[in-house]
Amino acid sequence: MKKLIRVPCIDQTEQWPTGCESVSAVMLLHHLGVNISVDDFIRDCLTMQEFQLSDEGKMIGADPRKAFAGNPYDAESMGCYAPVIVEALRRALPEDKNWIIRDLTGVSMETLCHEYLDRNRPVVFWACLEMREPEEGPEWYLDDGESQFRWISNEHCMLLVGYDENHYYFNDPWQHRGTVGYARALTEARHAAQYAMAVTAYSEEEQTGCRLI
């Protein structure tokens, strides 16, 4: 049996080369019936902080748990972590419903599948680009000029939309992949390498748009 939530795909590659988190969040919002563009989401909802060189020659950048490090239009930028997307979704969701936003970081894959996908709730999901090996670095200083942050490179965000016995299925916004399946064990390893971060949002009303095939 294969469970798949049909969500329209958005490709990030040309317009938002480091915008996988925003693009995945917007795909989730579209599933929820929220009419918002990726550009509007980035401009109005996403907290960002550009890199700067200090007078001492230190590279100063954002804590990705608090802001996007760089900006999603820049291929040399980094990205952001789950708390930033939680706050961006909070800004993006209209006030016409009682929305619930969940930071699912550390939640097991079994729970993501059976407590969320089975209830028609796609999940913004951190793993690695093309399921490559994670790489440590680069590093930069945070705003205090003393604390350092080490990025885990090959970070990538997708929208988790389904599963079967052998694969998890994602709307992968990179290189026009569309909906693609990745092997379970590999996906779980890459997800763990990016701190097992995940986020979802839904209303208290029943969700629609899912089918069993």
Image (cartoon, rainbow, N blue to C red):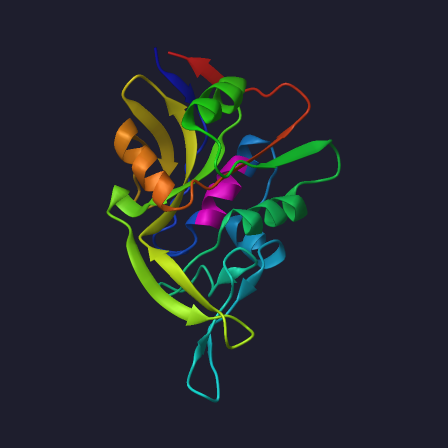
Whether residue 21 is visible, yes or no, is yes
Residue appearing at x 51%, y 66% in the figure: 62
Pick whichever, 23 or 163, lies toward us.
163
Instruction: Answer whether residue 183 is visible to the viewer in this image.
Output: no
Q: Quadrant of the C terminus?
A: top left
Query: Residue 203 in magenta?
Result: no
Residue 64: % across, % down: 50, 58
Q: Residue 122 at what x, y percent from top left?
A: 49, 29
Q: Looking at the image, which is closer to me, 126 or 12?
A: 126
Q: Is residue 25 magenta?
A: yes
The residue lying toward the viewer, choosing from 113 and 56, is 56
Relative vertical location of residue 120 with respect to residue 39 in this rendering, above or below:
above
Q: Residue at x 56, y 75 (%)?
A: 144
Return the x and y of residue 69 as percentages of the image width and height.
47, 63
Towards the viewer: 135 or 51: 135
Which residue lies at the image location 50% right of the left edge and 39% below the top edge? Answer: 105
Q: Taking 192 as reference, is 52 above or below it? A: below
Q: Quadrant of residue 99?
A: top right
Quadrant of the drawing holding the N terminus: top left
Residue 4 drawn at (x, y percent): 41, 21
Q: Is residue 62 left or right of residue 10?
A: right
Q: Is residue 49 left or right of residue 17?
A: right
**Residues rendered magenta in the picture:** 21-28
Q: Is the magenta region chiefly helix, strand or loop? A: helix
Q: Is residue 156 above or below residue 168?
A: below
